[in-house]
Amino acid sequence: MPRVYLSIGSNIERGRNLRSAVATLCQRFGSLTVSPVYESRPVGFEGDDFYNLVVGFDTDQSVDEMNLVLRGIEAAHGRVRGGKKFSSRTLDLDVLLYGDLIDHDPPRDIPRREITQHAFVLKPLCDIAGSSKHPETGETFADLWRERGDWLPPLTPVSISL
């Protein structure tokens, strides 16, 4: 069974949506490894700050099956697709890693490029999988974080019970 890591973000009713998403993912996929939550500025638009975290779990579902489940969870949380790419959202669930899979044929992007582009993705991934290696670069996520650890704007840790 591959180990999967998901990025979770929300900037609309952030705490409620993150708690509900984690509970739903736990019911659907079983035990989760959950990172700390970080607050970050939106990327590509002006809006309320996001709460972001990463969860890890093992699954026997295919990437396509899992993506259908994730889109359903987003929809159940009020996510409407088809609008602007960069906009506020109730819930955003993105597959970062699916085992060692490398697949950038649309609509897939695994490993997700944002891992090396955004602190709000890399830091929580590093928190729970720091010694794991990026399937393409071979670097550990801890090494990637150290190389890029002076991101601007900085992340703010958030104390929230999930």
Image (tube, rainbow, N blue to C red):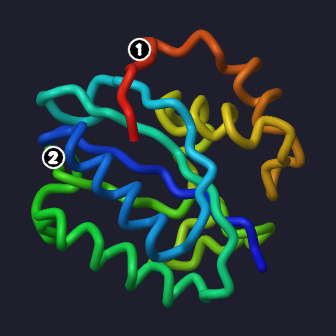
Residue at 80 percent across and 67 percent down: it is 100
Q: Tell me the residue that label 2 is attached to.
A: 87
Measuring from the top left, give residue 59's x and y in whole percent.
65, 78
Residue 156 — which label?
1
Q: Quadrant of residue 155?
A: top left
Residue 47 located left or right of residue 41: left
Q: Amino acid at mark 1?
A: Thr
Which badge, 2 or 1, is on the more N-terminal residue? Answer: 2
Residue at 73 percent across and 66 percent down: it is 3
Q: CA separation, marks 2 and 1?
A: 21 Å
Foreground pick, 17 / 156: 17
Report how many numbered discs are placed on residues in the image: 2
Q: What is the secondary structure assignment of the residue under circle 2?
A: loop
Residue 48 — which label?
none
Residue at 65 percent across and 15 percent down: it is 149
Classify 126 as above or below 67: above
Classify 36 as above or below 158: below
